[in-house]
Amino acid sequence: MRLRRLLAPALGILCSVVVCFSSRADSEGPVASTRAGLVRGYVDHGINSFKGVPYGADTARHRFRKPLPPEPWAGIRDCLTFAPAAPQPVGHGKGDSTARAPESEDCLHLNVWTPGLRDGRKRPVLVYFHGGAYNGGSVNSDLYDGVRLCLRGDVVVVTVNHRLNGFGFLYLAELGGAEFAESGNAGMLDLVLALQWVHNNIAEFGGDPGCVTVFGQSGGGAKCATLMAMPAARGMFHRVWTMSGQQLTGRTREHANETARKVLQTLGLTPARIAEIETIPTDRLTVAMRGGTWTPVVDGTTLPRDPFSPDASPLSADIPMVLGNTHDETRGLIGAGDPSTFALTWDNLPAKLEQHVRSFIGSLPPAKIVADYRAWYPDYSPSDVFFAATTAARSWKGMVLESERRAGQGGAPTFVYNLVWPSPVDGGKWKASHTLDIPLVFDNVVYGAKQTGTGPHAQTLADSMADALIAFARTGNPSTPKGPVWPRFELQKRPTMIFGLPPRVENDPRGNERKLFAPVVYVQPGT
């Protein structure tokens, strides 16, 4: 009896732990009904969380073709952890959290966070597509966790994995015939299928299928832009928010066909034996397609025209859009891979510009670029000039063109932002670099501390950006009561929201840089 009294507190704690685990993993988690079957999730800070929900069938059984809906299942399917990411080259587009994540051709899964189930609330739905170009990456990271957005704005958050690289964009229509007619954009059709899943199922999760915002960063933003020109996606989304990712043009069929021939040659296949590609092991295919260029193909059917060339696709003229970039994109995009760019001299700066952005500066002499930047920004170091010029020519130019073409189109409003807040990480080395806006718009600075640091300024900025995203998802206008009015972008004044501390609106920020590179013909990377 004495021993029992002594052990009682410990036994009570143990029992509570067991009950807590059981409620998440066994029978007490929230259950939702989808068209394919029942799914069980768990509750995180009061938010119903479902991870690894199938929205499509195993693509290994239907390689290089339009995706199929998931096969129905009996009983309740536990959706408590991320499902495998798409096959991809080792280390490509993967952060620390996904470097060892499982991969599979059975990758058509999504994750849902929602404050309520079957409550008829019709919450705005935010659907996120990940970066990594079209070659790598996944949403299997806490960085994209939707709990805080749900708590902040009473919204539903959905994040999506889909086919990448050659599995999603190997153009076999001309070499393989009609059965491969949609192969060049299979990965984009995965996203269309995910949006169809949202349309058919999201009311069960407390969301409004008539109020869907697609948003994405880098390659994810480019995917959003591509969807804006795809007839199959028409009516599946109602707002677009892109971050550091544009897609003015797709690949030509000629270019895509050339890549396909090289892949077949690597595999030892002739066009006459193309059917054998369906039985080649996944790992061997991944290696054969490594190093290829993968972007959507203007195939005349699934993607009838370039998304933003020579103008904005009229298919989405009625959809409000936000376009944004970070002030110092290439500190991460180039600097992370070439540390020498942080220690440049005035003597070797022109050659380094030639090395990294030759195709983006056209006939502009590097010496003139350097001279102009030194005149505009006399306090800049050689490395500061390098990152400013490469950002303007390489990463910002696409956003400038998309915003101009949207403004020239009329129709629904376009809003433009530039994130200028310099991250304090590594002594401020990276400033407002590529990907910095992800933890801010998701209000996940705790998970994104490697990018934002842990100081109070990061959270203050996250408050502003997350609130703007939620306002835009709800109304089509990103202005918030706590921030300045965010004007619609137009070509005369070019009003732009500057996300710093505090946020402010500027007309034509960095206009001198924009005008310098305006005469250079922009070529979409990968096309």
Image (cartoon, rainbow, N blue to C red):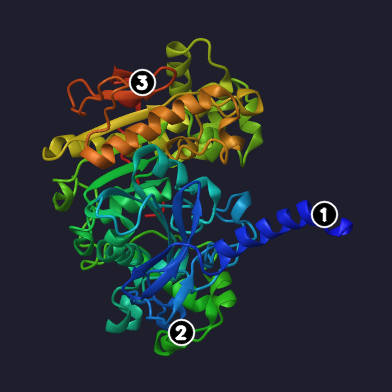
State the residue in front, 353 or 177: 177
The amino acid type of the residue labelled 3 equals Arg
Return the disc, 1 or 2, that comes first in the chain's sequence.
1
Q: Are marks 1 and 2 in contact (CB under 8 Å)?
A: no
Based on the displayed image, in which of its 4 quarters is residue 470 positioned?
top left
**Looking at the image, which residue is at 18% across and 27% down?**
490
Which disc, if any, is residue 278? 2
State left or right for residue 90 relative to residue 223.
right
Image location of residue 304, percent across then percent down: 20, 62
Residue 45 at least partly seen: yes
Calculate the distance from the C-alpha at mark 1 to the C-alpha at mark 2.
66 Å
Based on the displayed image, in which of its 4 quarters is residue 282 positioned?
bottom right
State left or right for residue 77 relative to residue 15.
left
The N terminus - image quarter: bottom right
**Looking at the image, which residue is at 50% across and 10% down?**
378
State the residue in front, 332 or 14: 14
**Looking at the image, which residue is at 47% across and 88% down?**
276
Q: Vertical placement of 339 versus 54: above or below?
A: above
The amino acid type of the residue labelled 2 equals Glu
Return the disc, 1 or 3, that comes first in the chain's sequence.
1
Calculate the distance from the C-alpha at mark 1 to the C-alpha at mark 3.
73 Å
The amino acid type of the residue labelled 1 equals Arg
Image location of residue 307, percent across then percent down: 24, 52
**Looking at the image, which residue is at 38% across and 59% down?**
295
Q: Residues within 10 Å of mark 1 (few under 14, many from 20)?
A: few
Residue 335 at least partly seen: no
From the image, tell me which residue sits under label 3: 510
Image location of residue 487, percent across then percent down: 22, 25
From the image, tell me which residue sits under label 1: 5
Question: Does dot 2 land on a helix, a strand or a loop?
Answer: helix
State the residue in front, 350 or 344: 344
Which callout, 1 or 3, points to the residue nearer the camera?
1
